[in-house]
Amino acid sequence: MKTDFPANAGRRRLLAGSAGALAAAGLAHRALAAQPAAVGTPSGAKPLPPYAAWKRPEAMIVHSANTIETRREAFGSGVVTPVRQLYVRNNLPAPDESIVQDPDAWIVEVAGVQRPATFSVGQLKTMGLQTLAMVLQCSGNGRGFFPEKPSGTPWQVGAAGCVVWSGLPVRQLVEHCGGLDAQAVFMTGTGGEKLPEGLDPNTVMVERSVPKEAMQDALLAWELNGEPIPLAHGGPLRLIVPGYTGVNSIKYIKRLAFTQKQSAAAIQQTGYRLAPPGQKGSPDQPSVWAMGVKSWINAPLASPLKAGPVVVQGVAFGGLHGIGQVEVSIDGGKHWRRAELVGPDLGRYAWRQFALAVELPAGEHVLASRATDTEGAVQDEERPQNAGGYINNSWRDHAVTVQVHA
């Protein structure tokens, strides 16, 4: 599967995030953070870490303090994922909460442009605004379906969400700085996490490079679903690279540089590489950049079901492209029927809801979905084999088996 940014990618224009879309999020994380944690944490489950304690415990699977997954049944039927049930993946511990207390004071350095400069978030807010809906998905989402169990969090489908970001278009910031250096090939973002002392920074720092073309649609974002970005999701400022996996959307961004070479950080050079099974990552292997076309079913999940009518529903997205169609099978892929795309279309980087009304007779049924993007690429049947368990878009892996009684 191709993971590089296509050379002919067109410039993305403004995707206006409607007030309705923001309202659909149904959230105000500041207010929620002040409320006591909700009841309903499953018995024996790990508690939410303090920096994410405001999330809905009954909607989350806490793998570790830095890896928190959305339960499949918690996605519901909306388009926009509420922040209270959005997954969390941090490669380093989150910085101190104090950095989001005065978000406008956060400073980001811009390099590799004709006029390098530093800007506060407050200054960025005076330079422009764009709102963009997109799928945020961890590179390892679906790793839990790999039978060889690669190292890393065994995500199922819940390391993903469709959210709305607001901030300054990177291309507009570059224009303000006089344009790119002639030698620029990559856009490189550096995170503002506190690094452990006594180590080579390149071994632990979160710094990722993507092709410079990605800047056309990228944002320096300060709002998530209409609210200031919380610490757990990269506030006060996050680089947003739509169509790419989440590791490329750098949290707590402190430096944005346009560079001739990819970052020397281990997370770029050897981490997040599509290494063959049994091999270690290396710079000559494809980097985990763009996402492919993918879908999965979110309902029905519970068994047993009563025989009769049911609506099979789920979500589909195309990475760098929009969704053209989604098909649903109730017999494990032997026969397919075209589903309806429902709900608002929030742009090519967002996911689409799909639904198909079917009759399920008594017995066992394997429900599967298969998406096709607007460029004609069809969701893969089998997972891409790689050592890290990355970019699993297999429709067969994501199928659901349900029992139906008369």
Image (cartoon, rainbow, N blue to C red):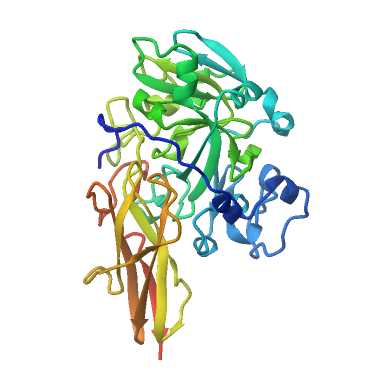
The answer to whether residue 147 shows anywhere in this view is no
156 left or right of 44? Answer: left
Find residue 254 and report its horizontal and vertical position in percent: 57, 22
Q: Up-down: is 45 above or below 213?
A: below
Along the line of sight, which residue is nearer the eye, 347 or 158? 347
Residue found at x 22% / y 72%: 335
Q: Up-down: is 179 above or below 276?
A: above
Q: Up-down: is 94 above or below 181?
A: below
76 left or right of 404? Answer: right
Residue found at x 63% / y 52%: 84
> For the C terminus, which image quadrant?
bottom left
Find residue 350 and report its horizontal and vertical position in percent: 43, 48
Along the line of sight, which residue is nearer the eye, 221 or 280? 221
Along the line of sight, which residue is nearer the eye, 218 or 57? 218
The answer to whether residue 368 shows anywhere in this view is yes
Q: Up-down: is 283 above or below 225?
A: above
Along the line of sight, which residue is nearer the eye, 384 or 379? 379
Find residue 141 and report its horizontal and vertical position in percent: 42, 49
Q: Quadrant of residue 300?
A: bottom left
> For the N terminus, which image quadrant?
top left
